[in-house]
Image (cartoon, rainbow, N blue to C red):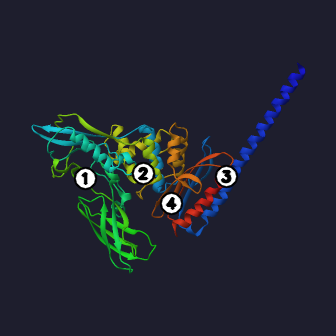
Amino acid sequence: MANFSAMYLMRMKRIFVLCLCLLCVITSFGQNVSERLATAFNQFLSDAQLKQAMASLYVADAASGAMVFARNEQFGLAPASTQKVLTSVTAYSLLGRDFRYQTHFGLLTNGGSAQLFILPSGDPTLGSWRWPNNSEGAVLKRLAAAVGKTGTGKLGPLLIYNKGWGEEAIPNGWIWEDVGNYFGAGAFPLNWRENQYDLFLRSGNAIGTPATIVGSEPKLYDLTINSRVSAAEKGSGDQTLIYLPVLSREGVIRGTIPAGEQRFKVSGAMPNPVHQFAESLKAELGASVSPDAPALLLEEKGTQAGILHTEVSPSMDSIVYWLNQKSINLYAEALVKTMAQQGGKPAATEAGIDLIKQFWKTKGIAETELNIQDGSGLSPQNRVTTKAQTTVLLYAKKQPWYQGLYQSLPTYNGMKMKSGTIGGVKGFTGYHTSKAGITYAFSFLVNNYNGTSSALVQKMYKVLDELK
């Protein structure tokens, strides 16, 4: 018995020593990462591209939440599209991973006449080409079939019930140069085909010659675009911007495209997706619908029939996947308004932003660390801290829907992280698991750098490589 006790004590001692050694190795490794990050970050700050810039980096152990490295983590910086991580995590938290938009279509009868009405939900995926079952053609065919089953004769003008939705589709702080282009599409109660269209231009072979518009997809019903585009060097890419004057149905596209192009694609934002949808539906239904423009109503009146048809969106996992993979600003802005509406507030950006701030305040993030104007990060007026963004990632890591968020993040430099780019701003926010098996959450933002974005990105990667 004495021998057994001695052997037991010796075994326990060995286990204790082994655990102690392992702990020392892990602690030493963590310290080395911190030291290496400090060296790399100081070298980064000394680069000429950062002479007038502000840079901030916060790294934490994703398992324990312990800070590994922090520099300028309390300074509010423009996050660009890294802000979509904040919107994604909040949407998962407040709406749930199983949330789906529902857009209802019904028939309003008044005596012998009938009108098709829509109860919009703000669904940003309605008519999107990213899901075959949700595409423009698929939606229109299902709706036409539902109308056909009613046996109704000619329909009056389409009715859109707008109750609870703010009038402004564009958030405060967005700049004019962005609004006419596909990435500047506003979030409406009824969104259609991601509120995006494609222009096709033909350029001459000689530099400086005019480029003409040769078509669009889809056909534009409520908008005319005039070209002021000219040909530039081959390989120069898309250097155009579309401008939409306020309260006008005419826009202009300026800039350059490469010479010798026969069908060069440039994507723009629909200023009136409701009208575009109505006209597309009329084309599908043919002569059975009135040619008059759709009417917007602030409340539901006199509905005499039930819902004919309901379009259901993909789930939150799928929406967030495309939101982050393709950095779709519309999806982020629609989610902000949806969170407000589902929270019993007006479906407006301001109400959604206030709700986001209040939610994260309960998680320990001060409102002053989330000085935001929108959900996508397109506004140059947004200011967030890298500590706040990393805190959001740490929270997400512990949630049952974490894998959905993780899979939505693109891969750059061998790391799962959301990038962000606007004028003078570059950022990366995400996760990385090292060769030693330690998972880190991090946020890295740079504002007001000089030189090219591509050169800066390689230098940022060099700092983040210390996590590998």
Which residue corresponds to mark 2? 372
Q: 297 and 266: which one is in front?
A: 266
Q: Disc 1 or disc 2, which is closer to the eye?
A: 1
In the depicted structure, whether residue 46 falls above or below residue 325: below
- Point out residue 75 in the picture as x, y percentages from the top left corner: 52, 54
The amino acid type of the residue labelled 2 equals Ile
Looking at this view, name the residue that lies furthest to the right: 3
**SS under mark 2:** loop
Q: Which mark is residue 280?
A: 1
Looking at this view, name the residue that lies furthest to the top: 1
As drawn, is 46 to the left or to the right of 99? right
The earlier-in-sequence mark between 2 and 3 is 3
Answer whether labels 2 and 3 touch (C-beta < 8 Å): no
As drawn, is 125 to the left or to the right of 37? left
Which residue corresponds to mark 3? 34
The amino acid type of the residue labelled 1 equals Ser
- Residue at image point 40% right, 57% down: 379
Q: Disc 1 or disc 4, which is closer to the eye?
A: 1
The amino acid type of the residue labelled 4 equals Lys
Q: Which mark is residue 426?
A: 4
- Whole-angstrom CA distance, mark 1 to mark 4, is 39 Å
Q: Disc 4 or disc 3, which is closer to the eye?
A: 4
Within 10 Å of disc 4 (Cα), the crowding (few <14, some 14-19, many 20+) is many
The amino acid type of the residue labelled 3 equals Ser
The quadrant in which residue 98 appears is: top left
**SS under mark 3:** helix
- Point out residue 200 in the picture as x, y percentages from the top left corner: 34, 66
**SS under mark 4:** strand
As drawn, is 162 to the left or to the right of 302? right
